[in-house]
Image (spheres, grey):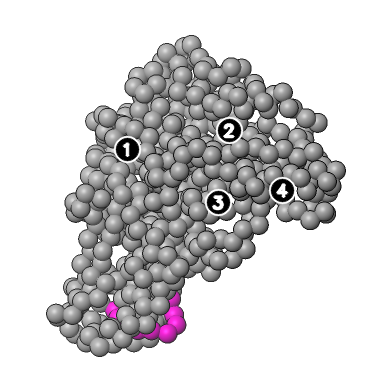
């Protein structure tokens, strides 16, 4: 089954389904146009059905709108993508890329034709990132257009049998094709009206995973969404621990992975801003100092990299675990798991910073205490300078890209992810700087950033209102998700003057009054995550 004419028409349009949202929610913001949108939904895409927004108001100043954006003219199909063998620039290991050079594409097309196939070479262009090349990224080679995934898988087996590496793909995830359906949910919290609070939370334990809806139910949350990136496999650390900067009730619970996007939720949500943040933790014993490189993580393992001395890179790299041979890590009393064991030195500090014990790594963090663990030279430093009964100081500093120090109080929290989507009212996606794509390695981050995925996004508008949004994805024929560029366009269309991409994929979730309102992409259902943002009602008494 082929759809050549429909595919060509769709490719010529290039404009994505996000344009439908733009037609409904203009740059003035969703709330200024909501009534008109609901009364007379319109469409900016040929064949698209203007979304009808349904509205919930969990509390004064908190409104949630949901819609399904449909483009009936879109004709996505299943296809077989032939992948290029490359060497990963960061890992040095063999990898496969769906996009490669024009020369590779030409050679691959000729080889496929010689084997009796009818391949096509398609040009793939860079998204409009602020820090990557513009124009043509490369070429992809595909075979066939199929009505079902099973048909495409059968065709892929035939292509693989003659020596090619293949992937079965749904063209509705392609950035240069319109999506046929998108399920979106948008919550806006107005601090001038809302009497409750907003906080980023680990629910008292940074070393655990819980679903967004279960945390929302436990806390009596009005709206909850998943938040920061976190460790998902034992090989990368303790599951649930954050891989970027986070703070809970004014205390740092993890350090930044380089300079990446973060959201500072100050004064219980009264003031929210988005900025790239860095962190610095200095441990002092008398006149001696040592720079810690982690809070609440396994020493030696740095998920998403971005720390000085890390190998293979000190830069942020999404979903890559770097190593540190010499590493000092601080553990707070919100570390609810067993402390990591192994070679090195451990120091327990009481609430005043006095050394309680010096010894082997392991055990638990006593209530109100802090634990320092060191490996390599950090272990030597602790052994040399930690004396029972003497004080060790720990200074934590958070700064934004302007060098301003971010001071945290007990009603402040921080969540983070990557990359920045909107800055000062303009789409500004620093995808390479924040380590989610690599122009020199098209096997890295291509699907993560440049194809449609489930996304969770957060932003703030000109009136100081917090915007939390989700789009379902990875549901062929259901909801396909956003590329990073589409996510930025969508947030800008909602009136965001600053916005960032939060954790997405199977983690994407929104709960309203404790009930899940979106459809997560994992086959097993809602994913347990490492941290959430919760909109909490005013407490009485």
Q: Is residue 162 left or right of residue 347?
A: right
For disc 1, the marked residue is 423
- Residue 241's label in the rendered image is none
> How far, Cα to Cα, is label 2 from label 4?
24 Å
Q: Nearer the viewer, mark 2 or mark 4?
A: 4
Secondary structure type for disc 4: helix
Residue extending farthest to the right is 116
For residue 62, above or below residue 377: above
> How far, Cα to Cα, is label 1 from label 3?
26 Å
Q: 345 or 411: which is nearer to us? A: 345
Residue depicted at 37% across the width and 80% down the height: 375
For disc 4, the marked residue is 107
Q: 285 or 114: which is nearer to us? A: 114
Q: Is the residue under label 3 in contact with that under label 4 (CB below 8 Å)?
A: no
Residue depicted at 50% across the width and 40% down the height: 126
For disc 2, the marked residue is 176
For residue 389, above or below residue 414: below
Q: Earlier in the sequence, mark 1 or mark 3?
A: 1
Within the magenta stretch, is there residue 117?
no
> How far, Cα to Cα, is label 1 from label 4?
42 Å
The answer to whether residue 211 is visible is: no
Give coordinates of residue 379: x percent, y percent. 33, 83
Residue range of the region highlighted in magenta in the rendering: 339-348
Q: Is the residue under label 2 in contact with that under label 1 (CB below 8 Å)?
A: no
Secondary structure type for disc 3: loop
Residue depicted at 62% across the width and 63% down the height: 94
> How far, Cα to Cα, is label 4 from label 3?
18 Å
Give coordinates of residue 316: x percent, y percent. 41, 58
Q: Earlier in the sequence, mark 1 or mark 4?
A: 4
């Amino acid at each position: 089954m082929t759809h050549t004419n429909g595919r060509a028409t769709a490719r010529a349009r290039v404009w994505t389904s996000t344009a439908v949202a733009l037609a409904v929610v203009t740059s003035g913001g969703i709330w200024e146009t909501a009534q008109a949108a609901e009364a007379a939904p319109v469409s900016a895409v040929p064949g698209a059905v203007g979304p009808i927004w349904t509205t919930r108001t969990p509390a004064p100043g908190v409104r949630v709108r949901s819609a399904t954006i449909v483009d009936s003219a879109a004709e996505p199909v299943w296809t077989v993508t032939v992948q290029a063998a490359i060497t990963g620039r960061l890992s040095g290991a063999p990898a496969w890329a769906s996009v490669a050079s024009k020369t590779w594409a030409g050679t691959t097309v000729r080889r496929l034709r010689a084997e009796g196939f009818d391949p096509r070479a398609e040009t793939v262009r860079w998204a409009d990132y602020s820090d990557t090349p513009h124009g043509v990224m490369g070429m992809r080679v595909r075979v066939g257009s199929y009505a079902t995934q099973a048909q495409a898988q059968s065709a892929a087996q035939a292509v693989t049998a003659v020596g090619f590496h293949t992937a079965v793909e749904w063209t509705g995830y392609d950035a240069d094709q319109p999506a046929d359906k998108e399920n979106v949910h948008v919550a806006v919290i107005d601090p001038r009206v809302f009497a409750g609070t907003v906080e980023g939370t680990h629910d008292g334990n940074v070393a655990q995973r819980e679903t967004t809806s279960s945390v929302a139910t436990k806390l009596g949350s009005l709206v909850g969404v998943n938040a920061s990136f976190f460790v998902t496999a034992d090989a990368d650390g303790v599951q649930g621990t954050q891989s970027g900067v986070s703070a809970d009730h004014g205390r740092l619970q993890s350090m930044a992975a380089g300079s990446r996007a973060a959201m500072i939720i100050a004064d219980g949500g009264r003031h929210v801003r988005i900025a790239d943040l860095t962190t610095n933790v200095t441990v002092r014993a008398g006149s001696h100092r040592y720079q810690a490189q982690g809070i609440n993580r396994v020493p030696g393992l740095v998920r998403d990299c971005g720390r000085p001395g890390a190998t293979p890179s000190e830069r942020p790299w999404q979903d890559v675990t770097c190593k540190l041979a010499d590493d000092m890590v601080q553990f707070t009393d919100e570390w609810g798991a067993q402390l990591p064991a192994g070679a090195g030195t451990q120091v327990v500090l009481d609430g005043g910073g006095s050394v309680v014990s010096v010894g082997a790594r392991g055990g638990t963090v006593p209530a109100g205490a802090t634990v320092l663990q060191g490996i390599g030279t950090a272990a030597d430093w602790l052994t040399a300078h930690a004396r029972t009964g003497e004080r060790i100081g720990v200074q934590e500093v958070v700064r934004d890209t302007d060098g301003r120090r971010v001071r945290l109080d007990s009603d402040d929290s921080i969540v983070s992810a990557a990359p920045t989507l909107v800055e000062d009212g303009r789409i500004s996606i620093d995808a390479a700087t924040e380590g989610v794509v690599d122009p020199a390695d098209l096997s890295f981050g291509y699907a993560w950033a440049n194809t449609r995925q489930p996304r969770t996004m957060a932003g703030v508008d000109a009136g100081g209102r917090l915007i939390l949004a989700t789009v379902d994805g990875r549901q062929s024929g259901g909801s396909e998700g956003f590329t990073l560029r589409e996510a930025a366009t969508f947030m800008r269309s909602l009136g965001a003057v600053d916005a960032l991409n939060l954790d997405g994929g199977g983690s994407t979730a929104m709960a309203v009054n404790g009930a899940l309102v979106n459809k997560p992409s994992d086959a097993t259902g809602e994913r347990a995550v490492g941290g959430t943002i919760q909109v909490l009602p005013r407490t009485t008494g």
